[in-house]
Amino acid sequence: MRIELDKLVEIQKAVDCQVEIGGIDHDSISLRFGYWNRLTDSDLEKVKEILGYRSIEEQLVDEDDDCGELWNYKVWYNPFR
């Protein structure tokens, strides 16, 4: 899956924090915001709008007493969305 650099820059500006990209498989990637931050509902809607025909799923990766909740977001292409 491909996402243009311009879109990633636009997402970073929209959510006002660092964005990290990770590979999952040939059909999807993961996005991480800040230090495993959870996006607000309004920020998540902004990201969905920027991504267009891609789906995004919020995932709780881990939770512990030291770090709290750790979130990432799985992104994949969905032409039927």
Image (cartoon, rainbow, N blue to C red):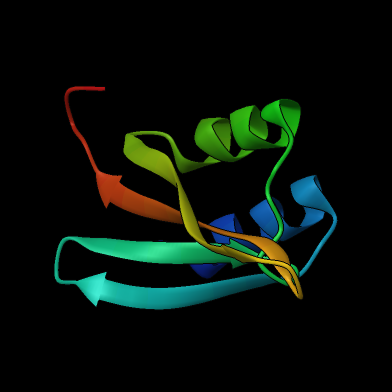
Location of residue 70 (image quadrant) = bottom right
Residue at 32% from the left image edge and 34% from the top image edge: 53
Asked if residue 46 is positioned above or below residue 2 in the image, the reply reads above
Image position of 1 (left or right of 50): left
Location of residue 74 (image quadrant) = bottom left
Asked if residue 20 is positioned above or below residue 38 in the image, the reply reads below
Image position of 41 (left or right of 76): right
Count how many numbered circles sit on residues in the image: 0
Residue at 85% from the left image edge and 55% from the top image edge: 16
User: At which x and y percent is residue 40?
Assistant: 74, 35
Residue at 52% from the left image edge and 34% from the top image edge: 48
Looking at the image, the residue that sits furthest to the top is: 81
User: At which x and y percent is residue 42?
Assistant: 73, 26
User: At which x and y percent is residue 14?
Assistant: 77, 46
- Taking depth in this image into account, of 26 and 33 the one nearest to the observer is 33
Point out the image quarter for the C terminus: top left
